Image (cartoon, rainbow, N blue to C red):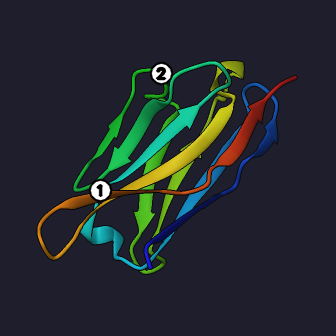
Amino acid sequence: QVQLVESGGGLVQPGGSLRLSCSATGFNLIDSPIGWFRQAPGKEREWISCISDRTYYADSVKGRFTVSRDIAKNTVYLQMNGLKVEDTAVYHCNADVENTLGSVEGFWGPGTQVTVSS
């Protein structure tokens, strides 16, 4: 079964760093793009990064966040440096998985909380 689980969130001071992990089961990451999203209370869900054959970043995190993957571990990472208070949110990873009929299904992990506060 397809499953995504995020980990690595926590409380960090402004300017600090965290590394989030997105572990996948039931499919191979090399076959599907993986996206990172976040949602803060009272705000719309925001796309922040994705990785496929290359990486992409939202302007809000570009230069501070780095997405990577370990194919052997079937895991995608999001290294977050220079964290700001406004980065506080629940972070989710997303996989768009193509089935045998050629259609794409979206899968989401339950999320991990990142809190940036002094």
**Left or right, 45 with reference to 54:** right
Q: Which residue is mark 1?
A: 33
**Left or right, 34 with reference to 39:** left
In percent of width and height, residue 86 lies at 65, 19
Residue in view at x 70 percent, y 55 percent: 8
Q: Which residue is mark 2?
A: 60
> Amino acid under label 2?
Ser
**Left or right, 79 with reference to 41:** left
Looking at the rendered image, the quarter that the C terminus falls into is top right
Helix, strand or loop at mark 2:
loop
Helix, strand or loop at mark 1:
loop
**Alpha-carbon neighbours of circle 2 within 10 Å: few (<14), some, or many (≥20)?**
few
Q: Nearer the viewer, residue 8 or 32?
A: 32
Marked residue nearer the N-terminal end (1 or 2): 1
Q: Which of labels 1 and 2 is toward the front?
A: 1
**Alpha-carbon neighbours of circle 1 within 10 Å: few (<14), some, or many (≥20)?**
some
Residue in view at x 22 percent, y 56 percent: 53
Residue in view at x 16 percent, y 76 percent: 100
Residue in view at x 43 percent, y 52 percent: 94
In percent of width and height, residue 18 lies at 68, 45
> Amino acid under label 1?
Pro
